[in-house]
Amino acid sequence: MRRIILVVLLIVNSSVLFAQGDLLSLVDNQPAKKQYITAAFKSTRVINDHSMEFLGKGVLDVRILHRFGLLSSGANNLYGLDQANMRMGFSYGVTNRLMVGVGRSNIGKDLDAFIKLRPIWQSKGGPWSMPFSLVLVSGTTLSTMPWSDPTRKNYFSSRMAFYNEVIIGRKFNDNFSLQISPMMVHRNLVPLATDSNDTYAIGIGGRIKISKRVAFVVDYHHIVSGLDMHTYKDPLSIGVDIETGGHVFQLHFTNATGLNEVQYLTGTTNSWGKGQVGFGFNLSRVFTIGGKKH
């Protein structure tokens, strides 16, 4: 009888051990949970251009863009600090994949608006993970300047311009992110009859992490067609992002004076090669006004 009880106990114990091992193997074989990649850039803009980054749902971003004059203007103009252009903008995260924004700049007294959508979000683990993000941006600008010749017949549509952009970006690791963004700008009214209404460009934006709160950023656009490149230049901006709690403070140098996509893509005439570069800064402050901050 004692032997029978001992055999039964050995069988039960073996069954328990086998079951535990089987359960552990099931846990080990569970597919990894899908994780979306965030913080590719410190804010929703690289410098001038949109970044692949988005606001969280219910988050409002209040952003001030400031561009001073050329450093080459000399001490009489305090190396450009006596001159300044500014844009104030408001962006809102409708969802984690959709945001909208409006702004106003003193150049051309432009009003602008945009919508930004992320149909593909870089992710890892789980089924259908994606190695990159795909972002679509569409926007419009409206000049409110008085007509240069009010005696002729002027059309409201002549005040308007539009742009469309596709951003393909990837966060390679915690220290490096890169994006490429083909863009098209359409202006209803151009300065000269020989000018094209459509301008095409390819943008490149990059971020290199320097420390936990500081990153080096580059924002460059090559004009492919639509402008006389003897007069106009490719906009290039380099700077650093400094994160301080809810603020992102960016210092940069750029040859672009424009403060929206239409302005800096079709209106940059300064050249880095000739030292025609100005100092500027962008200041972003986010507020959670609905739902949870992500």
Image: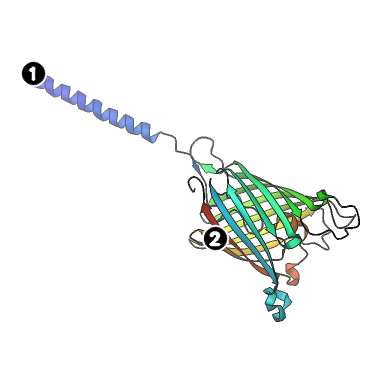
Q: Nearer the viewer, residue 145 or 47?
A: 145
Q: With 63 as the anchor, is 29 left or right in this view? A: left
Q: Amino acid at mark 1?
A: Met
- Residue 273's place in the image compared with 114, above or below, is below
Residue labelled with disc 2: 248
Q: Where's residue 112, x and y in %?
A: 70, 53
Q: Nearer the viewer, residue 255 or 172?
A: 255
Q: Nearer the viewer, mark 1 or mark 2?
A: 2
Residue lying at 68% horizontally and 50% vertically, measured from the top left: 113
Under circle 1, the secondary element is loop
| Residue sticking out furthest to the left | 1
- Residue 272's place in the image compared with 207, above or below, is below
Q: Amino acid at mark 2?
A: Val
Calculate the distance from the C-alpha at mark 1 to the C-alpha at mark 2: 78 Å
- Residue 234's place in the image compared with 40, above or below, is below
- Among the two numbered marks 1 and 2 on one chain, the one whose residue lies closer to the N terminus: 1
Residue labelled with disc 1: 1
